Amino acid sequence: MMSLLKIEVFKIFKRPRTYIAFAVIALIIILIQIALKFGGKEYVGLMFSGLNDSFEEIPSEIVLNGYLVCFVILNLLLIHIPILVALVAGDSIAGEANMGTLRLLVSKPVSRTKLLIVKFIASVFYTLILLIWVAFLSLFVSMALFGVNWLGIARELELNVMEANDVLWRYALAFCFAAIGLICVAALAFMLSVFADNSIGPIVITVCVIIVFTILTQMQIPFYDETIKPYLFTTHMLGWKGFFYVKAVDGVTVKGSIENLPAVLKSAAILILYTLGFLTIAFWYFNKKNILS
Amino acid sequence: MSSIIQVRGLTKSFNEITAVDDLSFTVNKKEVYGFLGQNGAGKSTTIRMLLSLIRPSRGNIKIFGLDLLTHRKEILQNVGAIIEKPDLYKYLTALENLRLFAAMSGLKLDRKQLLGKLEKVGLEERADSKIKTYSQGMKQRLGIAVALVHDPELIILDEPMNGLDPQGIADIRQLINHLSKDLGKTVFISSHLLTEMEQVADSLLIIHKGKKIAEGNMQELLNPEQSKIEVETGAAADLEQRLKQTTWGSKIVSANGQKLTMQMKREEVPIFVRQMTDMKEDIYAIHKKNSLEDYFLSLTSH
């Protein structure tokens, strides 16, 4: 199993296009960091414009620190990284079929189930490496560029404030949660890949599903809040923010608290269920599929 | 002679279309078994079923005496194949491709061993070049190296001469002979190049519209007892007239331009040649016309 996994990872990282995602992410994050470095004051003012006046007295250099920059980047990026994940996971089986190598792989003395397992694990491995790259650039590079201070997160009309030494563990959990969300997207693209003989289809469908579901998730229509949103995996992919919503007593943040941990865990569980569902379909279909490509 | 492949009642239907219809055949050990059929006859579907890429609708496949459905892994451990064209990873080098597929067969080969495998197909000097820089012939040779990397007992080649130049075809022919005659491998080969098949195959299976229409030893199928010969002369029509006044007249098939086609027993051919000399006929050449192509067309053209 390990040697097969090494083969799959080797194949992924030998393809030049694999690195496009890393380059795109680096470019976007660097552009955001440059924008915040030079125009951060206005951005912070806009971000906290709905809050009370006392907040405006705090110098923006304190508010705009590495932790807040990372939060801003994740808020902007975690919707788009799935698209980059789909590039590799959607290509996983369909790309092999398109290249004509799938028939050679399946005619080797390796069971189809095992082949699919190692291919999915390789896609997960790529996803996690991509996420570590995001974490490095958005968190650690931002911390180096903007320094570290308390983190203030604006939520509608209230502000959640976390002390500097109460933030890093939240990011660690947020990235773990993001990994669950991205693996769910990888599983969707992977499942679609099993059905196709060309990787464009699964990649485009995955991207379309994410775009449509994200629009539905973000629409402020009460009817959808109860009927559709709770069932969309994109809704639960935003669960990482829950680690930055804190409990407060008399207006003072309870250190180490998470406002609604059960909701966060529920979202994680739903994403895992989606992942398992996508994978079950993929394994069921691939094991009976006629390899005609 | 022990059998390597035993296929019984193999059938594959795709919705309403029956691609392979109740096919049965046996391939013996150390045999080069030719598999012939027109495009769409069901050759590739059959080969894909032999490699468990496609699940049969009905029938049974036994390879090395084991049922393919229940002993897939053990069987494929000992099978090497090229299916249609040898598509490999274009962004990898020949050495990387070979190492990767060796590993998939459970082998861990070092660079020296891999170079040795590439040397056998004449690619050792391009071992570190990416496949995207290879010609079709080189890809084909690498495909064969991949098929043979784990030293399989049964080699299944689907159109291995496709896209090759004459030298490449001759090399493949030589390699197939070497695999079968020197190394004792069993080779199952499909090709539409009938003259090539005639030169390498010991036995033949011909399918048409998914059904078997002929199977047997090459010599039996081509019926050497009744040789068809083509006599090249000055004017075929004149010779035809003269021969019609002899007992040879009944053996004339056709006369066209400078070519007279006749059918006779093999042992009659030298007698005919002697008589032509006695009759002082100008004979420029005599060609044997009993080819696989004639036989194949006679079976499939109606």
Image: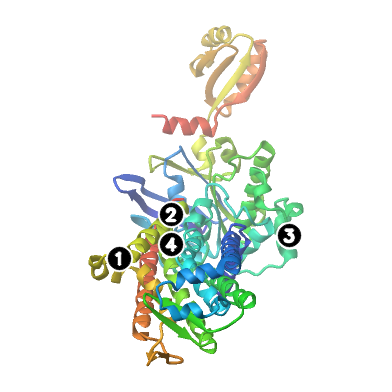
Residue B139 point in image, percent of width and height: 64, 48
Q: Residues within 10 Å of mark 1 (few under 14, many from 20)?
A: few
Residue A242: mark:
none
- Residue where numbered disc 2 is placed: A204
Q: Does residue B266 appear in this view?
A: yes
- Residue where numbered disc 1 is placed: A220
* SS assignment at label 3: helix
Q: Are marks 2 and 1 in contact (CB under 8 Å)?
A: no
Picture layout, residue B85 above or below residue A273: above
Residue at mark 2: chain: A
Q: Amino acid at mark 2?
A: Val
- Residue where numbered disc 3 is placed: B116
Q: Does residue A117 appear in this view?
A: no
Q: Are marks 4 and 2 in contact (CB under 8 Å)?
A: no
Camera-side mark, 1 or 3: 1
**For the residues tagged 3 and 4, is the chain the same?**
no
Residue at mark 4: chain: A
Q: Earlier along the polypeptide chain: callout 1 or callout 4?
A: 4
Camera-side mark, 2 or 1: 1
Q: Nearer the viewer, residue A9 or B260?
A: A9
Snapshot quadrant of residue B183: bottom right
Camera-side mark, 1 or 4: 1
Q: Nearer the viewer, residue A144 or B230?
A: A144
Q: Amino acid at mark 3?
A: Gly
- Residue where numbered disc 4 is placed: A189
Camera-side mark, 4 or 2: 2
Picture layout, residue B55 above or below residue A48: above
